[in-house]
Amino acid sequence: MEWTLLATAPLGLEALVEREVKELGYTVVSVDNGRVFFLADGLGIARCNLWLRTADRVLLVVGRFRAETFDELFEGTKALPWPDLIPRTARFPVDGRSQKSQLSSVPACQAIVKKAIVASLQTRYRESWFEESGPDYRIEIVLQKDEAMLTLDTSGAGLHKRGYRTSTGIAPIKETMAAALVLLSRWGGHRPFADPLCGTGTIVIEAAMIAANMAPGMQREFASEAFDWVGAKAFETARQEAEDSEDRATAPAFPLVGSDIDSRALRMAEEHARLAGVSRLIEFRTQDVQSFAPVAEYGCIVTNPPYGERIGDQEQVRIVETALGRILEDSPTWSLFVLTASKGFARHVGRREERVRKLYNGRIECKFYQYLGPLPPRRIMQAGGLERP
């Protein structure tokens, strides 16, 4: 059976999530702010949860209808096929949001939806009370401009929780955002890669997983594995496909480099890389960004430096940003991609960016500065690697 699914995403990354969904072979129906709607079956639910690197969650859209009154919300919810989705013993908590709608009381809407789902289940199971002792089927009611959308969460924990990051630094970047920065850079394993401010290693680890074609969700579980209509068989198949497609034999042309002045953070990074299964692809160095020097040409730096609102004072921020500008000046064949909320970043780097994109790192509005170096010569691209100097 084919369902309408919704991959949620941070604002600004919708096109990237859309591209990922299409690359997995699924039809995108529409794209909205932070939302990509597409069609997939049970195996598709498993594949998308395993493979989507930049989405926050994969939700099943149970139904959409207009609801200006509580009666309309109750009847519209009750009419949806809940007995086909939720077993008798399931836990089904209801979350809610409301924006620009007449039904503005979220707690009241949650209660109405819960009551309507119970009424729907009673028609199938003929019980007056449900124990809710089984697996979670988390439901959300979203009201926007008087349209109600009911969804069922197939992911469980957010997709950024890959399973390899057991410790975090002072200001960690989410794994999904880190993967997005790497994908937006269009870096490939035939070119050098570095993060000279790597902290606990998330960006360079996500880059290594991309280079090795590793499914980011291989080390975790998902809520829909317990859903009878998706089933463990679908996830077993999807995991076997992912394992078969993983490129363990072919390493990138150069080791990916992650460096940082904080040795404690680097110890965490090394442990995270080990847990992610990419230690062999990454070289970690204890090094100040001011001492960083690329060892080859046509490489790519992707980084998320401290920018004052998170850690460090403004003088430290200026020193770091000036150092990144110096790397660009000294390494004209390299490309630089930086996510920051620093207001003075472009001035301190001392070079005009080719592109800039607005993104949100958590709740902080940031800019993704892109300084594009030249592409490697054709002979190097065709060889699939770079000649060492």
Image (spheres, grey):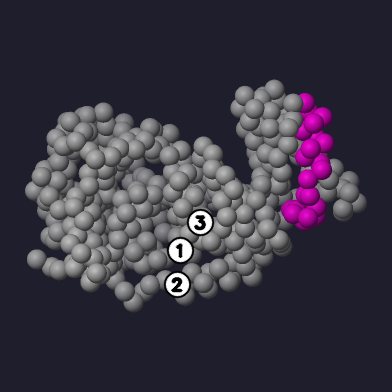
Q: Residue at x 31, y 50 (%)?
A: 185
Amino acid type indicated by mark 1:
Ala
Q: Quadrant of residue 231?
A: bottom right
> Residue at the location (23% across, 54% down)?
300
Residue 22, numbered circle: 3
Nearer to the camera, 383 or 336: 383
Image position, residue 228 (x, y; %): 71, 62
| Mark linked to residue 215 | 1
Where are the magenta residues, as a range? 69-90
> Quadrant location of the C terminus?
bottom left
Give the answer, above or below, for where 237 lies relative to 29. Answer: below
Classed neighbour count for the residue bearing mark 2: other residues with Cα under 10 Å, few (<14), some (14–19), many (≥20): few
State which mark lies toward you, 2 or 3: 3
Q: Quadrant of residue 283?
A: bottom left
Q: Pinpoint residue 256: horizontal percent, then vertical percent.
A: 25, 61
Distance in Å between CA atoms under marks 1 and 2: 9 Å
Q: Quadrant of the N terminus?
A: bottom right
Contact, CB < 8 Å: mark 1 with mark 2?
A: yes
Q: Nearer the viewer, mark 1 or mark 2?
A: 2
Left or right: where 64 falls relative to 296: right
Residue drawn at 44 percent across, 43 percent down? 13
Callout 3 crowding tier (Cα within 10 Å): few <14, some 14–19, many ≥20: few
Which label's residue is closer to the chain start, 1 or 3?
3
Residue kind at label 2, given as amino acid type: Ser
Please name the residue that numbered disc 2 is placed on. 245
Residue type pointed to by label 3: Lys
Earlier in the chain: of badge 2 and badge 3, it is 3
Q: Is residue 82 left or right of residue 37?
A: right
Q: Residue at x 62, y 51 (%)?
A: 5
